[in-house]
Image (spheres, grey):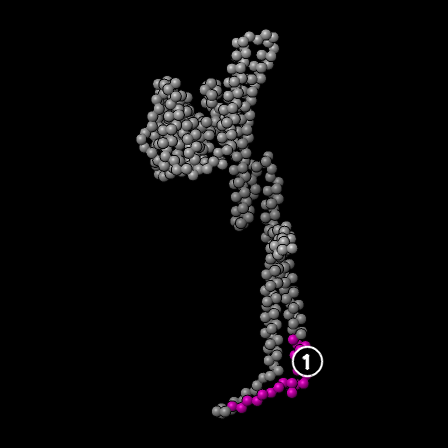
Amino acid sequence: MTHTQKKAPLRSFFAKMTLQWRLTALTTLLVTVACIFMYFFISHSAVSGMDDLHDYAIHIDQNDSSPITFQVDPSMLFPQINDQLAQTKQLFMIKSLAVTIVVILISSLSTWFLTRKSLAPLRSLSKKISDIQAQNLSVSIDVPESHDEISKLTEAFNQMLVRLNNAFDVQKQFSANAAHELRTPLAVMQTNLEVFSKKKEPSVSEYQTLFSTILEQTNRLSHLASILLDMTGMQRVKRSDTISLAALADEVLCDLAPIADQKQIKLSQSETDCIVTGSYLLLYRAVFNLVENAIKYNHPDGSVHINITDENGFALISIKDTGIGIAPENQEKIFTPFFCVDKSRSRTMGGAGLGLALVAEIAQLHNGTVYVSESDSEGSTIILKLPL
């Protein structure tokens, strides 16, 4: 058995002990070491002093230049002094040992009771935490008025509960919305298949209509599943690329030019540039979604312009369109998952209400924000703000 293997059981036993017993054991160990050290030091000093009594000198000085010194052996004057000194040393050692043991025991018991009293608020907090379930995350724990570490820990835990509760609510809402969006195309396909199955001799055109409907809904499901996968995997994407926003915007405009030409939308960008650090793939997707959205909800013969500026340590990517505008009460909601101002129109255009939510998620991953700067019936301006 190696030295490490011998230590393992002791380390495992110590790890299983409660905090109160650990503190008691450590304090007892420190007190024991200190008492043993003091015991041997004091005993050695006392015994050495007693041994020095065997031989000592009497110095008589009568203001003479040559003092007289007599060497005297105490055993000659007191024949029993050696036995008395031996008994005294033995008794002193026994008493010192007894006092040392009593001090160690009293210190250990005092440490146990003091730690028990000091850790009582922590045990109470632990019990309250164990009673919290997913159903009562909104219930906060009373903060002690002691203003000590337990109080700060309770405050931090309550703040964590608030964040967890908000995240849990968002997750539940997101799951419900995702289920609804996935269920809609499935219901459409199921209904069409049920109607088609009741036809005895369907025509070729009816087959084509059915296949067209299934293909359309399948593409919609595929598109939705792809976006959901993107949103769940963004946390793992590295964000260490050095990115020229002007070059990124130019690539986005080139990729979206065919779609813009179909709607007769003019695309343009300013000649300014900013350099940021992040994920090129994610930021490309964010700008792509913003520009694509500006094209979809634009008027024929309209325009989309990208302007890049720096302001107080941030790069501002401004996407200005001449579209239908966004109502003030919806300017924040459009960045939440599955929100659509006009659901029927969004579905017609192939939207699922996740494009701008994806932009908001990407901005947050880059310590930035996205918001509607201005909007009216003549168009909107959305700004993606990123730290330089």
Residue 24 seen in this snapshot? no
> Which quarter of the rendering shows the C terminus?
top left
Task: Sort mark 1 into few (<14), some (14-19) or many (20+) by Cα contacts within 10 Å.
Answer: few
Q: Residue furthest left?
A: 271
229 vs 295, left or right, is right
What element does badge 1 sit on?
helix
**Vertical placement of 174 versus 61: above or below?**
above
211 vs 51, left or right, is left
Q: Quadrant of residue 262?
A: top left
> Identity of the amino acid at label 1?
Asp
Residue 218 seen in this snapshot? yes
Of residue 246 and residue 208, the one placed in the foreground of this image is: 208
| Label 1 sits on residue | 83
Residue plotted at (42% across, 24% down): 293
Q: Give the magenta-colored segment's residue range.
A: 67-89
What is the count of numbered marks?
Answer: 1
190 vs 349, left or right, is right
Residue 69 lies within the magenta run: yes
| Residue 142 placement (x, y as % from top left) | 56, 43
Q: Residue furthest front?
A: 1
**Vertical placement of 64 versus 93: above or below?**
below
Residue 187 lies within the magenta run: no
